[in-house]
Amino acid sequence: MKNKAILGIVLFVLIFASLWALNDRAKRPRQEQTVRIGAVLSLTGDASVDGQNIKRGLELARADLAKKGIKVDINYQDDKTNPKESVTSVQYLINSYKPEAMIGPIWSFLEDSAASTISQNKIVTYSPAGTSEIVNEKSPFIFHGTIKNAEKAEPVAKWLKANNKKKVAIIVSQDAWGNSHEQAYRLAAQMAGAKVMMTEKTPFGLEDSSLSTILAKVKDSGADALLWTGYNDGALNIIRKTKELGINIPIIGSEGFSWVVASGKIKPSNDQEIYALKTKINPEFTKKFRAQFGEEPGTYADTAYDGLMILIQSIENTKGKQISLQSYLKNDLSYEGFAGHYLFDKNNDREKGSEWVMEKVN
């Protein structure tokens, strides 16, 4: 009888200890959970402005996740805007860091270089700055967070129509980025009932040397609006060259216009009418970003923030379940972020969940 009593006490103690341990584990702060994310960003080189914006967005999201008890470790690799470095960085992260998901590379030709490595290793990757329309090497494991350039056609068409512009000239960069804009601009002209007077393409890095000749053609074409896209140096050069040549027609272009003016690199003259196509920024995100960094958020900071939140939510929702991270993002994700709604289509692009707006650059 005594032995049975002792055995009962022992069993009671064991059961109580087990229940206490389970309860204690449930109450432990979530800081003990660490999610590993690899990030291949262009922190130096031509894409460094976008790279630094994206890094700030990620850091802001990481801080907010930490407040919720979710610890995220981000291993940043700088690919220096070099395709070979993009591949090396991806390989290093996969083989040595072993992340649960990745972010980047950020520009299309960098994504092209790394896409096969990402596909071979079946690692889910989020690109805050890309879409499938500007990449040549598509991967089923790369999801794109920004909205498509094709959707710029509508706001451009509305502006052309409202301002009675009937003859447009188009200048784009000679790459996938430029091609996607050319298609959008041609569609915009068609929607507005305007005629495309000329189209020119400038090789990457050679905008300055070819621009004077191209702009002379624009002047002779009789165009009453210029639709442009390229990179930040191109934005700087086109403002300067049109000023020098006395070309005073309105120019609509990419966010590069906003950046070169905001950074103090150039100031348009009073008779220059320049517009930048920008994604709509949520005021709450702007307030949050300004409080942390003391300035307005740059391009892709919000899609980077949302991207980290999406990856963490997806990792948590698939852990221990018979569903892959890739399948979840493709079929089950529906997320409302600062940059709008996220729902991925068959090409791993966002279905329309935000919008492009035209902002006059002062």
Image (cartoon, rainbow, N blue to C red):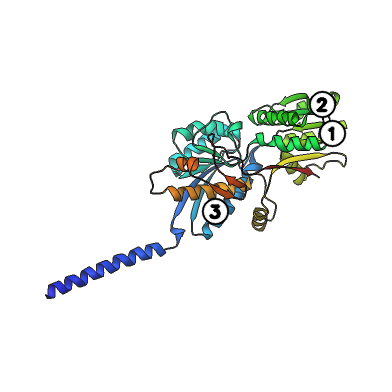
Image-based side of 97 in relation to 183, left or right: left
Residue 282 position within the rendered picture, expressed as x and y whole percent measured from the top left = 66, 51
* Amino acid type of the residue that numbered disc 1 sits on in the rendered structure: Ile
* Amino acid type of the residue that numbered disc 2 sits on in the rendered structure: Val
- Choose between 24 and 97: the one closer to the eye: 24
Instruction: Pick whichever of labels 2 and 3 is earlier in the sequence.
Output: 3
**What distance separates the C-alpha of mark 2 from that of mark 3?**
47 Å
Decide: marks 3, 1 in contact (CB < 8 A)?
no
Looking at the rendered image, the quarter that the C terminus falls into is top right
67 shown above or below 8 = above
Instruction: Pick whichever of labels 1 and 2 is earlier in the sequence.
Output: 2
Residue 69 position within the rendered picture, expressed as x and y whole percent measured from the top left = 49, 59
Residue holding disc 2: 218
Q: Secondary structure at mark 2?
A: helix
Image-based side of 305 in relation to 6, left or right: right
**What distance separates the C-alpha of mark 3 from that of mark 1?**
44 Å
Q: Secondary structure at mark 3?
A: helix
Residue 279 lies in quadrant: top right
In percent of the image, x 82 and y 43: which residue is there? 267
Residue 182 position within the rendered picture, expressed as x and y whole percent measured from the top left = 70, 28
Q: Secondary structure at mark 1?
A: loop
* Residue neighbourhood size for the residue with mark 2, other residues' Cα within 10 Å, grouped as few (<14), some (14–19), many (≥20): many
Q: Is residue 226 visible?
A: yes
In percent of the image, x 68 and y 28: which residue is there? 183
- Choose between 151 and 49: the one closer to the eye: 151
Residue holding disc 1: 249
Decide: marks 1, 2 in contact (CB < 8 A)?
yes
Residue holding disc 3: 62
Instruction: Pick whichever of labels 3 and 1 is earlier in the sequence.
Output: 3
277 shown above or below 172 = below
Q: Is residue 231 visible?
A: no
Task: Report the number of discs.
Answer: 3
